[in-house]
Image (tube, rainbow, N blue to C red):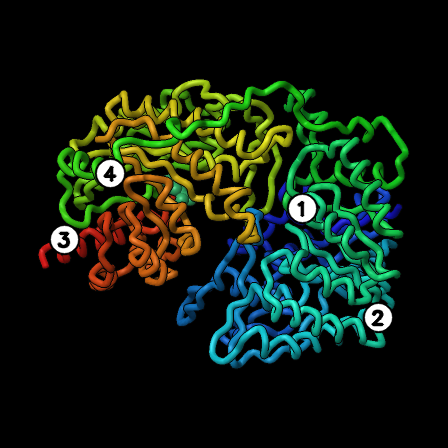
Amino acid sequence: MKTAIAGYPRIGGRRELKFATEAYFAGKIRCEELEETGKQIRRENWKTLKDAGIDFIPSGDFSFYDLMLDTACMVGAIDSQYRYPGASDLDIRFTMARGRQEHECDLPALPLRKWFTTNYHFIVPHISDDTHFSLTGTGPLEAWKEARDLGIITRPTVIGPFTFLTLASFSGDRTLANSLSSLTAVYVSLLNLLHQEGVSVIQIEEPALALDLNEEAVRHFAQCYREILQSPSRPAIHLQVSFGDVRDAYDAITRLPFEAVGLDFIEGKKNIELLTQKPLLPGTALIAGVISGRNIWKADKGATEHLLEVIKRLCPEVIVGTSCSLLHVPVSLDGETRLDAKIRDKLSFAKEKLDELVFFASREYTAAHGTTSANITRETRQILPDTSETTRTPSRSDRRKIQDKRFCFPQLPATTIGSFPQTHELRMLRAQKRRHEITEEAYDKSIRQMIQECISFQEEIGLDVLVHGEFERTDMVEFFSDGLEGFVYTSAGWVQSYGTRCVKPPIIADDVRRKRSLTVETAVYAQSLSKKPVKGMLTGPVTILNWSFPREDISRADICFQIARALRDEVLDLEANGISIIQIDEAALREKLPLRAEDWRSDYLDWAIPAFRLTHAQVRPETQIHTHMCYSEFSDIIGEIDAMDADVISFEASRSHLSILESLAASNFQTAVGPGVWDIHSPRIPTVEEFVSTISALPSFAGGIWINPDCGLKTRGNREARESLRNMMEAVKRVRQK
Ligand code: GLN
Ligand code: ZN
């Protein structure tokens, strides 16, 4: 069998792209140098893929920022404001991605959104009445030529028109329906050009086919690809669908003469069933995505061989592939010398996955890649919680009375989400500690000074519930997993999150238990500095799970309950040490909601919500539990969010405006709500008047309203953060008087 991969990481083995791009942003290197770094990374990747013996090697999967953004630029979907005088192609791209504030020029960035259920964020293209699609770039062709000149024949890849428009935002009269045919025409001319230049095969990625699609959407998809496939002069087309199964579009796919269709057999749970019910057209090969592009374990040998056997019985021509682009796993294990050999042997990053593909395609056993067995196989006690373990008593309304008496907050109590700006000074301090240039004691002392200063600032402006500022944490997950047994760290397991931002998710390799108290000392110290309550601050079990690479021998539900029990111990420890309000952040709860509505509950919410409840169910009635979620796109799961049974929830609302508030009010949401009144993702400082009008416009809620920013402040500058908070508090005071 042949092998194909959908895409390869583009940050470089040592994050070269990040450093070069940031140097370019800072004006330290020229555009040509940045381009050169890109070229080197591409060359190195192609060579790696070729040496590994991959048959379909991708090109065009590289990007200086994001492929959706590149696609927008390729088809002419660039708002005219971004074409400012003197801007190069790359500058236009970076401006669309990051905005630009200089002299007279004040261009907002396009929004970022999560790419399906991954932790990668793409740039959301904007289609307005002024958007006229035309082929304004030939990126895939140039990439293909660049590889060819190195003697490597590749399969260029592009994001397809259906996915592009499904994820785009529209204004004016524009819709997907009235934009698709003109966009399809642009793809037809691209394919024409590729064909003329000698490209024999192209991959078109259409992950939007893994979403819930109605009949009209499927009709649009089919119409678009009929036109593309009918084009007389085109390369062979490999349709690639990752992140789920194609249950709605499968029938349409089987009627279209693709040369190959790539399906995800890791996350696409219905794909086998679909193939069993109806074969692909004769002449359409199947690219079987049996190697996970989402997790870092070697594939289970027996299970994968069995899966391939089943697939081969259903399709005459099978190519062995990855479930999705390898962008979502770290580059290679080469630098991981510090990992325990027992764990390392079970891991497979992007580079190692190439060997796995070749192994399963050729069935030639070699010691290097032959020892594939499932990750952890030790006996784990799995104890599912019963309802008493996940139910807090008394009821929320009874608790509210007790808590009201205890805290006596004014109307519209005000707080912040947790972190304060991570200043240059703080980063330097951390670097010094890493390099052992300062002692632990000196480090702790400096952190304590920052906490002290942070608390006195909050007292001065008059917040009601304070935070310690989270100066001791680099990351919401790493900090916690460090104090928990069962987590393993890589030295360089970086994965791109967006643009130049990379994350290094920990690996859950064993049963999770609390090794020691995680936050008690800091929380107690911070509380000692004020008479007002200072929140204990934890990351919730679902978020810790979602931002790690999970083991695969037990279910995600089981892992999540293990983390939840460890956190429960911490919650009770905080309470026992006099902390009266504890916030348990679930920043990433919404993001792993399954793509298909019919799977939301059974595959996810039915365990995720109880796991959260387990962390706080045993606290006393007078202890107040807060939670925070970063996105407010939860109007479809309001009941479940309320069932987390927190006393107070804060969430983002300043960008999504009032729609979520109306749905919450209409569904008689019982948790007290803190809809973010300040968009902390923007450096703008809102005025007192703006805050007054935002706050005055808030509808009333059964559980009451809190005033807060819409997320932590760690990415903001000190001055803007403090001025904004001061304005927010001034506004709160004015509204209270009214
Ligand atoms: N408590 C965290 C902070 O304030 C929450 C971060 C987040 O929601 N992403 O930084
Ligand atoms: Zn947040």
| Disc 1: which residue | 269
Mark 2 to mark 3 CA distance (whole Å): 67 Å
Say what amino acid the circle numbered 1 marks.
Lys
Mark 1 to mark 3 CA distance (whole Å): 54 Å
Regarding residue 28, the answer to whether it shows in the image is no
The residue shown at (38%, 46%) is: 641
Q: Earlier in the sequence, mark 1 or mark 3?
A: 1
Q: Residue furthest left?
A: 737
Residue 547 at x, y percent in the picture: 52, 39
Say what amino acid the circle numbered 4 marks.
Leu
- Neighbourhood count class around disc 2 (C-alpha, 10 Å): few under 14, some 14–19, many 20 upward: some
Q: Quadrant of residue 106?
A: bottom left
Of 460 and 344, the residue lying toward us: 344
Q: Is mark 4 within 8 Å of ligand 1?
A: no
- Residues at discs 2 and 4 in contact (Cβ within 8 Å): no
In the picture, the disc for residue 461 is: none
Residue 238 at x, y percent in the picture: 78, 60
| Disc 2: which residue | 195
Residue 320 at x, y percent in the picture: 81, 46
Where 669 sits versus 297, above or below?
Answer: below
The quadrant of the rendering that contains the C terminus is: bottom left
The residue shown at (69%, 37%) is: 349
| Disc 3: which residue | 733
Check disc 3 and report its element: helix, strand or loop: helix
In the picture, the disc for residue 466 is: 4
